[in-house]
Image: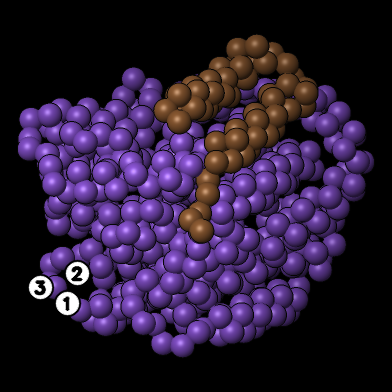
Amino acid sequence: MEGFPVNPAWVGWGIAVYVAASLWIALLSRSGKAQNLSDYFLAKRSLGGVVAALSYGATTYSAFMLIGLAGLTYQGGVGALGFELIYLSGMVLVAFFGPRFWLVGKKFGYVTPSEMLGDRYDSKAVAVTTAVAGCLFLIPYSAVQLAGVGYLLEGMTDGAVSFTAGAVLATVLSVVLAWIAGMRSVAWTDAFQSIVMIVTATAVVLVVIEALGGFGTFFDTLEREHPAWMAVPGNGFFSFATFFGLTLPWFFFSISNPQVSQRLFMPATLREMRRMLLIFMVFGLVYTLVAILWGFSALIRFPDLPSADLATPKLLSSELVPPVLGVVVMVGILAAAISTVDSILLTLSSLFARDIYGNLRRNPDWTRQLQVGKIVIPLIAVLAYVFARLKLNLIAVLAVSSSAGLLVMVPAIFGAFFWKRGTAAGVLASVIGGGLLVLWLEWTQTKLWGQASGVWGLSISTVLFVTVSLFTRKPEHKAEQFLGYLKKSLEEKGVM
Amino acid sequence: MRNKRILAVSLVMGLILSAYWTPYTWLSQVHAWTGSFLFWVMFVLAAILLNVWITSGWRDSR
């Protein structure tokens, strides 16, 4: 039985309610004029664990989950679960890096991860380069979200809401939510959106599985009709090389992606950070399972779709999902996309204001930097929108290559905390060399020895970081100050 | 503390490696949800427990 497009009027109402609620929460979150940059960009370094966890969840999990990941499941099977859960397990990096970022952030007043790296390696060039790399790779990532919303609304209403209308809506709302109160409005609307995301997705999956005969029948059907989807390499999609290439960049996500690593500066105390970490992991496990089960449901119901990206829109507008619930889930996906984009916009604007503008101009004061940051938010959004209009296929592939690009910062970040010998030249060589390699591999769609771009990016950047550092002079004083402080504090605070 | 850290890092690395190795070897011919699907869920639960342990000593100043 063919599905029917959802009534555009209901879609309109759903969006209207969601937009109104988000704006209201954003406005409520304001707390007077920003006194300094950490007010606006870091919510005064005073986030509680629960809001921080939910905000982390909303920022991390995007339209990719219910559209891209579901599509990957549809196409390749259980390997998609492994991929996403290996990403989640990467949060163990926060158990080590979290307190380290947090302590130096507080002590030395860092607003962005690039500022931290620039200070640690005693080099403005490091701050500028890592900030530029962040912008370069996160704008495509944002574009993917905006495109995801465009496709979703277009698919669900059979074109009544166009791709353009959807993408523009997502762009404008992301800008507004970031603009209203900086990290305050982002964190609070994130918390709201993450609850919407997880509740709506869980509800619809339970409804769909029930309609497909309950969990027992569900798994029996999968095992009987699509056995290859239950193992890896399974039907061949998730070859080991593919799996490794996909998981590697995402494993380091929590430290390589500035929109989430910046959040390590924000919790009020270590206790709140611990809460953030643990609550987020539980949230992540549930949300991941839901997205995977959703993808499998689409496989059962619509086994012969021409493209995996159609899995979600098809299933959402099918007879298995009551129309009202379908609209509600659509809003949940919208929330996932927008909460990711507004966080990225805010982080990128802080990187631009603090590390690019802040370093290239002669010491502008913080009010100027804040002004520049605010102007940059809509500018970056427009850039992302333009990229989204190029309508590149397979959402999952794009998102991954952005992550592969940021992966090249990982050696520098490890070096900052664990290797006194690291130098600014080493960082620059690793980030620029590794970054260019990833860009070239992605542009030419080359897989050297069958391995994905991220594998080579990380390998080359590690080699460059270590060798160039060994041949150049280390920032003796800064390294001593930075690492010396940490050594004492980590011991005091009971951090491993 | 240093020994604890070494232990923690070793456990983490072992766990992560198993998440790559096990499904692609032992479980690659198990076409049931009790294969890789269940394995990876258990793997994340183990990771969460590891995180609980690693962060258990964190303390803020008075």
Is disc 1 placed on a helix, strand or loop?
loop
Side of A330 relative to A356 (left or right): right
- Alpha-carbon distance for marks 1 and 3? 6 Å
Q: Residue at x 82, y 24 (%)?
A: A224
Is disc 2 placed on a helix, strand or loop?
helix
Name the kind of residue labelled 2 in the image: Gly
Colour in which chain B is drawn:
brown
Q: Return the residue at label 2.
A: A358
Q: 10 Å neighbourhood of mark 1: few (<14), some, or many (≥20)?
A: some
Contact between marks 1 and 3 (CB within 8 A): the answer is yes
Q: Is residue A122 above or below residue A439?
A: below
Q: Residue at x 25, y 78 (%)?
A: A366
**In the rendered image, what is the letter of the chain coloured purple?**
A
Q: Return the residue at label 3.
A: A362
Q: Position of residue A7 (x, y in %)?
A: 76, 73
Q: Is residue A125 above or below residue A431?
A: below
